[in-house]
Amino acid sequence: MARDSKDVFQQPSAGTVTHDEPPPGLRGASRETFFGQPVGLSTLFFTEMWERFSFYGIRPLLILFMTAALASGGFGFKRETAGAIVGIYSACVYLTSLPGGWIADRLLGLRRAIWYGGILIALGHLSIALSIVFARSAFFIGLILIVLGTGLLKPNISAIVGDLYPEGGSRRDAGFSIFYMGINVGALIAPLVTGYLGERVGWHLGFGAAGVGMVIGVITYWLRADKTLGDVGVAPASADPSEHRRIKMIVGAGIGIIVLLVILVMTGIMQINPVSVAQKMTLVIVGMAFIYFIYLLFGGGLNIEEKKRILIIILLFIFAAIFWAAFEQAPTSLNLFAKDFTNRVVFGWQMPTLWLQSANSVFVIALAPVFAALWIGLGKRGKDPSSVAKFAWGLFFAGLGFVVMVVASNIVIRGGGKVLVSPWWLVLSYLFQTFGELSLSPVGLSSMTKLAPLKFKGQMMGVWFMAAALGNLIAGLVGGRVDPEKLQDMPALFQQTSIFLFIAAVVCGLLVFPVGKMMRGVPAGDR
């Protein structure tokens, strides 16, 4: 799961609620603290935890539901179509973070953006849960609402976490560590709940449970925000009425276009091929990234050192997209493998397919402190690997994860598709992929902020989101190739994925020394 950037978790000092003075700038905030942090962090922690519960509760459920037979309550879609839809959905969640942050900065303010975003997400889940009555139109309208709501909530709740610490420093890092723990707790619990309800009781009950989680998050935010956050994030960065009117017109036009497209599709006037759309979106994102990087290098007014940094960012963008294209197969190809070819019987009881999706979160929570200690220990001895070297290790570990799946799928092939393999194959694959994620994801986000020229720092977050969106699209396009009726395609998919990852790891590793030579004079911590 590409959960934001799962920063290595520093261990905050444990404690209970106390009554210290609120940090400067938090006028009107409670004086209580949360594990030594501003008490407003608790509000954001639980809001984000429930939002992630809702997101990771339905994402892996989508492909199982859409490919289930009509008699089983599903849509009966082809696996390639369902995989493409999941890829488009996940990619759009990342892409809408860009306009979502812009709308919050220029019009709504961070706090209102989070509030409206949470409501849209909850309405989206309600629409999906009611699609049993209103059929497919309500299902896809629900997905659109979740995408729009996540775009408003996700980037802005993280921004408010940063605003709780105007003094910066290690206390801020510890606060983000606690915040990211909430993300992983939500991602861990979600598949356990929605998987059981969705697969064993009823699809829409599973979707509805994810929605209930978001409703709890919205209520938590509504009850606690004013008391614990003070005036943080209330006012937008721009107070220009004319700019507000212009933004309202742009937002209104965008919503109008979305509504028009929905009506055209619902009435059958326009036909959409999800696979074709995903392929075209992939090309569009690649083209946008290419044009943007060309602009930075030749029209951005950068000096030689800044251009060198942009070249590094381009490399990291490419390698990150390759990594996410593999890693984000968890809700598609690996999820289908768990459903069709994995023996999930434990003590005579068959666990739901989605339960295996929680393995990654368990490993992240357990291993993030280990990776934090590793980087800190190497840094103290002057041996901390560069960002490019860490990316190479991340790609290599992910490649090992898919080698595991090649072995497992070949066991299935030798059994003619009738042999179910142990779930430990998937668990081992997720373990290696978590090694890769912890080597690459937090490092990538940190590198984007450290390497970016000052006047483009904000836009570099957009670049990171674009890499994740591109990876999700590719993962969705290839993720539907795990099919009992196409057994030979399965090991080929995992083998191709591992080969691409290993080639990328080798190329990335070979670039470590040239990049290091090019970046001489740049502080070691920024490489």
Image (cartoon, grey):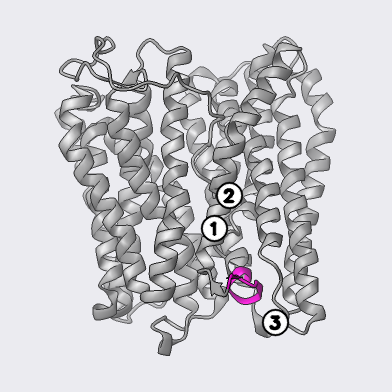
CB atoms at circles 1 and 2 under 8 Å apart?
yes
SS of the residue under disc 2: helix
Looking at the image, is mark 3 or mark 2 earlier in the sequence?
Answer: 2
Question: Is residue 164 in view?
Answer: no
User: On the rendered image, what quadrant is the C terminus found in?
Assistant: top right
Instruction: Reply above or below: 510 against 69.
Output: above
Amino acid type at mark 1: Gln
Foreground mark, 1 or 3, reads 1
**Closer to us: 305 or 5:** 5
Q: Quadrant of residue 126?
A: bottom left
Residue 486 badge: 3
Would you call the spot at circle 1 few (<14 residues within 10 Å), some (14-19), or many (20 or more)? many
Q: Residue at x 29, y 69 (%)?
A: 129
Would you call the spot at circle 3 few (<14 residues within 10 Å), some (14-19), or many (20 or more)? few
- Residue 268 image point, x, y percent: 33, 82
Q: Quadrant of residue 156?
A: top left
- Residue 342 image point, x, y percent: 65, 71
Asked whether residue 355 is drawn in magenta, I would say no
Instruction: Reply above or below: 112 against 344.
Output: above
Amino acid type at mark 3: Lys
Looking at the image, is mark 1 or mark 3 earlier in the sequence?
Answer: 1
Q: Residue at x 28, y 75 (%)?
A: 131
What distance separates the C-alpha of mark 3 from that of mark 2?
Answer: 27 Å
Residue 357 badge: 1
Which span is picked out in magenta? Answer: 337-347
Residue corresponding to mark 2: 360
**Closer to us: 333 or 49:** 49
